[in-house]
Amino acid sequence: MTEGPELSVKLEEMPPGTAEQRHRHARARQLFFVLSGLLEMELAGTVFEIGAEQALEVPPGAPHQARNPGRDPVRFLVISSPPTSRDRQEVTAPSSPMDDEST
């Protein structure tokens, strides 16, 4: 949607039964805003369910992983400041049945 030196806004869709790799960003602060569906977000060991028109903020340095354990796609905005390019570090996670899936 937009990406500049201070701000990035991306529209993402996560298919059912998928998850991204658990990671952190050293500098970027992110806001995940769900447009439709239900997003499960693990943030520093705590799992949150984020429904339509709800959001979760992820501070810099916090390990996190977005997952869609449901049967429907999830559409959401990811707003990052500064943008996350070259700022992603993968981290290991506790065992989860969805760890092998990725988007």
Image (tube, rainbow, N blue to C red):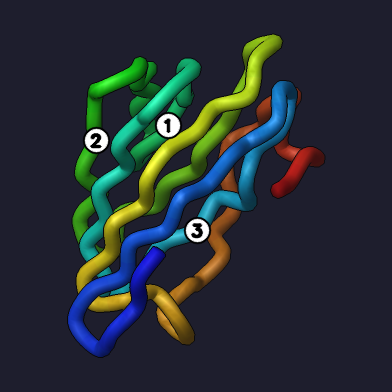
Q: Position of residue 81 (x, y in %)?
A: 21, 70
Residue under pointer 2: 56
Q: With respect to residue 17, does 95 lie above or below?
A: below
Residue occupying the point 56% across, 65% down: 90
Rounded to the nearest whole Å, what is the CA distance between mark 3 and mark 2?
A: 16 Å
Q: Quadrant of residue 91?
A: bottom right
Residue occupying the point 50% across, 71% down: 89
Which mark is first along the chain, 1 or 3? 3
Residue occupying the point 46% across, 50% down: 11
Element assignment for label 1: strand
Q: In front here: 62 or 32?
A: 32
Q: Which numbered tag is attached to residue 41?
A: 1
Element assignment for label 2: strand
Residue occupying the point 34% across, 18% down: 52
Q: With respect to residue 39, does 90 lie above or below?
A: below
Q: Are marks 2 and 1 in contact (CB under 8 Å)?
A: yes
Rounded to the nearest whole Å, what is the CA distance between mark 3 and mark 1?
A: 12 Å
Under mark 2, the amino acid is: Leu
Which mark is first along the chain, 1 or 2? 1
Element assignment for label 3: strand
Q: Position of residue 55 (x, y in %)?
A: 23, 32
Q: Is residue 14 left or right of residue 60?
A: right
Q: Residues within 10 Å of mark 1 (few under 14, many from 20)?
A: many
Residue with the most extreme right position: 100
Under mark 1, the amino acid is: Met
Residue under pointer 3: 23
**Quadrant of the frame with the N terminus:** bottom left
Which mark is first along the chain, 2 or 3? 3
Residue with the most extreme front position: 1
Under mark 3, the amino acid is: His
Q: Position of residue 97 (x, y in %)?
A: 74, 24
Rounded to the nearest whole Å, what is the CA distance between mark 2 and mark 1?
A: 8 Å
